[in-house]
Amino acid sequence: MSAPKLSPLDPTSIPAAAAASAAGTSTTASTAPVDNELELVTAARAGDISAFETLVNRYERKIFRLGMNITGNREDAEDTMQEAFLKAYEHLPEFQGNSRFYTWLVRIAVNQALMKLRKRRPNETSLDQEIETGEDSFFREVEDWGPSPEQRFEQSELQGILSTVIGELDPSFRIVFQLRDIEELSTEETAELLKLSVPAVKSRLLRARLKLRQKLNRYFRRSENQ
Amino acid sequence: MKCNNLIEELSSYLDDALDPALRADLEVHLQKCKRCRLVVDTCKKTINIYCNSDPVPLPDDTRSRLHEALKLKLQRAHR
């Protein structure tokens, strides 16, 4: 059997059906591109390259952000993203469909990112170490933010603020925030992935939320933007 | 309930995971304490902003390298 034709990795360049045909497979709809995540995964497992590319295009930004928020380093985030997609493709036959594909991809990416973080900062990053925080500090900078910041800032400006502020957090806080509040994993899933206890995840999440709130206050307080 | 107790329970309150009696206590405190109301409100906004914000677009060179690496992988896989 000849090798399937490779597209230039543009999701619009080869219709799913054409790539599936080239791979010796068939799609359920002969002309319409596959859109549903599960259908895309099924097609990708059957050799439909453009289906996998669609998944990459759909999630590359989110996986890059996850890499940035875990490693705090652009180069490591890029490597994390590449390795996560390559591993996902390699292990696609093992994907059981018990969770969403994206959740499975996140787990792969988190493991890659944590390895990079530990390699870069071996003495600094023990996720299960006790973290000292002064409770009183959480009541600093308590001000009204007024109307929603989303209404007051351009999207790119807001993205820059959010990225800067989360980057200022200790990794052990920002990783838990990333998994629980941005990726919406459960406390138990987060604990399992990070090899932390459930109370440790809860404690870090609380502190991450409070610290982010406090740091964002300097950008979003009403008096700053009236 | 005091302010420091509210802080301890804040995450569970925001995640709607408090038992009803504790939640009622906390809400009584919130009615009386403006500072805690502001902490709760701005904490909710913090979570929502991060949840709802789109990730920054990938830099072009980063995206090119990702897709080049995938292309190589897919070529090898189907050789």
Image (cartoon, rainbow, N blue to C red):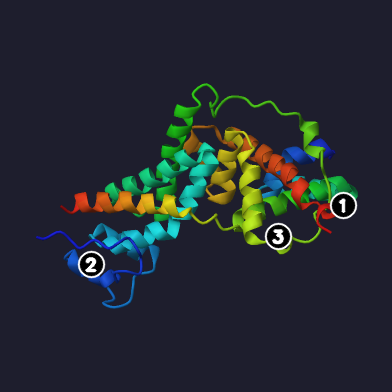
Measured as percent of width and height from the top left, residue A68 is found at 52, 43
Mark 3–mark 1 Cα distance, whole angstroms, equals 30 Å
Which amino acid type is shown beneath numbered disc 2?
Answer: Ala
N-term-proximal mark, 2 vs 3: 2
> Residues at badges 2 and 1 in contact (C-beta under 8 Å)?
no
Question: In the rendered view, would you say A167 is above or below B62?
Answer: above
Residue at coordinates 27% horizontally, 73% vertically from top-left?
A: A28
Eye-nearest disc, 2 or 3: 3
Q: Which numbered disc, 3 or 1, marks the residue closer to the eye?
A: 3
Residue A149 falls left or right of residue A103: right
Q: Which mark is residue A153?
A: 3
Q: Which mark is residue A20?
A: 2
Looking at the image, residue A159 lies above or below residue A28 = above
Q: Which chain is disc 1 placed on?
A: B
Q: Nearer the viewer, residue A224 or A18?
A: A224
Quadrant where the C terminus of chain A sits is: bottom right
Where is the N terminus of chain A found, in terms of image quarters? bottom left
User: In this picture, is B63 found above or below B3?
Assistant: below
- Tell me if residue A172 can be seen: yes
Apparent side of residue A181 relative to residue A32 in the rendered image (left or right)? right
Between the C-alphas of marks 2 and 3, the distance is 44 Å
Label 3 in the same subunit as label 1: no
Residue A179 image-quadrant placement: top right
Q: What amino acid type is highlighted by mark number 3?
A: Phe
For residue A27, above or below residue A114 = below
Badge 3: residue crowd in 10 Å (few <14, some 14–19, many ≥20): some
Location of residue A75 in the rendering, given as x and y in whole percent from the top left corner? 46, 40
Q: Residues within 10 Å of mark 1 (few under 14, many from 20)?
A: few
Tell me, for residue B31, which label it has, or none.
1
Q: Secondary structure at mark 1?
A: helix
Which structural element holds mark 2?
A: helix
